[in-house]
Image: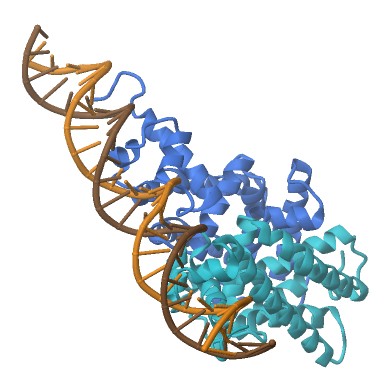
Chain colours: A cyan, B blue, C orange, D brown
Amino acid sequence: MNHRNGEDLTKERILDTAEILFAQKGYQAVSVREITSAAECNLAAVNYHFGNKENLYLEVFRSRWVPRAQCLQEGFRKYLASQESLSESAVVRALAKAFVDGPLSDDERLRHSQLMTREMTQPTKAFEHVAEQVIQPFFREVLERLSSVSSDKVGEEEMLLNIFSIFAMVLHFNFARVAVSRLTGRKYDPSFRAQLVEQITQFSLRGLGGGKMEE
Amino acid sequence: MNHRNGEDLTKERILDTAEILFAQKGYQAVSVREITSAAECNLAAVNYHFGNKENLYLEVFRSRWVPRAQCLQEGFRKYLASQESLSESAVVRALAKAFVDGPLSDDERLRHSQLMTREMTQPTKAFEHVAEQVIQPFFREVLERLSSVSSDKVGEEEMLLNIFSIFAMVLHFNFARVAVSRLTGRKYDPSFRAQLVEQITQFSLRGLGGGKMEE
DNA sequence: GTGTGTATAAAACGATCGTTTGAATGTCAA
DNA sequence: TTGACATTCAAACGATCGTTTTATACACAC
């Protein structure tokens, strides 16, 4: 089978390294040599373990991105369950908190957003996979949670666009850090992140038009 | 000097082609041969007219992206000037209209968002240029317009984050078309775009918390 | 020990990359 | 017509790309 130790550590190391580099630079901008060099293994290891470069990229999504997305979603549900009420406010706050200040480390969150953004602007085979398996189900979940507690009658399509708007902010404040930091003069420290959660939550809550407003 | 016709048409053709390809695929994913082939000119033309590939990329931003950004901003001001009042509502609607359904063609808008998004996730020398020359001034303009008509007292930083939130939606609904179309089942036809303008406008207006709401 | 299968290693493969070269072409001033 | 200049062209440069090949090292069943 495998060597006693170093089992498939090489394979795991390649996946970790590849994810970081793909997220930072994009698929085309990263060479196999760059990955194997950073992962401190032989050049041929990529082709041995994954067949080719494209397959490695897809495997990064399967074995790294998807689990992390599920971790985010679990964080969302955990936080929501800890609230006393499942109000619209609680749902939105849980959403913002999970994606901006949630269970993941800051680096992980950045990588996650970067990979997602790349697939949205330039979809590969990976997008098909994650859209069906992860994104679409989660969107429907949020949609149903919000619809069931929404004070005003809102069509499904309109509610979907609302959720998109919230996700737009969540993603934007993650992947556009350079621009946000540059224009606000703020670093992404815990203090600023907490402020962002508040910003997204309040803006979204008002945006949803729940409760206090009349049509 | 130059040939009678075909003056520097080659140079212009390269810039047009390069912009489309860079926006679609990103800098690294596009080869010089691909550009010159699509632009129907010789391979060496890129190095002759622009020195090297990187310089061509920067020139795309200088001669194509920046003017288009200014066109967008002018569209924003024109639409705003045509309104009877410079209310918060008018400012937000002008913003959404300019960027989602504004003076640019649909293709141009897509290219614009794609190039911008690439620079935000992976800034190059081009970002320094456009951030100082275009984005920062426009942000300040919107900030001042909104601050002067805002009904409630809001700190500058908070207002800046509000504007970021609006831009997040505007950019998102442009560059994430694939995902939006996939999850909503809608194509980006004029009807849907008009609906998006309404969505962004209404959501943002409520999000800003202007007028009807109490703190 | 022997054979089998797994993992790593160095070296090379052909293809493609960005860039350079040097000659050919055409235009305009003198 | 001649010389100077701007532009285009085919061809080749060295470097790097993803991938393959071949050999070696090791653990385990027999």
Does residue B101 appear in the picture of this structure?
yes
* Residue B211: % across, % down: 74, 68
Q: Is residue A128 left or right of residue D6?
A: right
| Closer to the camera in the image, B46 or B74 | B46
Please identify the quarter of the rendering in which residue B152 is found. bottom right
| Closer to the camera in the image, B85 or B50 | B50
| Closer to the camera in the image, D30 or B104 | D30
Does residue B152 appear in the picture of this structure?
no
Q: What residue sits 74% from the left and 85% below the top?
A: A75
| Total numbered badges shown on the rendered structure | 0
Please identify the quarter of the rendering in which residue A148 is found. bottom right
* Quadrant position of the C terminus of chain B in the picture: bottom right
Name above or below for residue A98 compared with residue B136.
Answer: below
* Residue B87: % across, % down: 67, 58
* Residue A44: % across, % down: 48, 68
* Quadrant position of the N terminus of chain B in the picture: top left
* Residue A167: % across, % down: 70, 68
Q: What residue sits 58% from the left and 71% below the top?
A: A49
Q: Is residue B105 left or right of residue A42?
A: right
| Closer to the camera in the image, B85 or B70 | B70
Name above or below for residue B5 compared with residue B132.
Answer: above
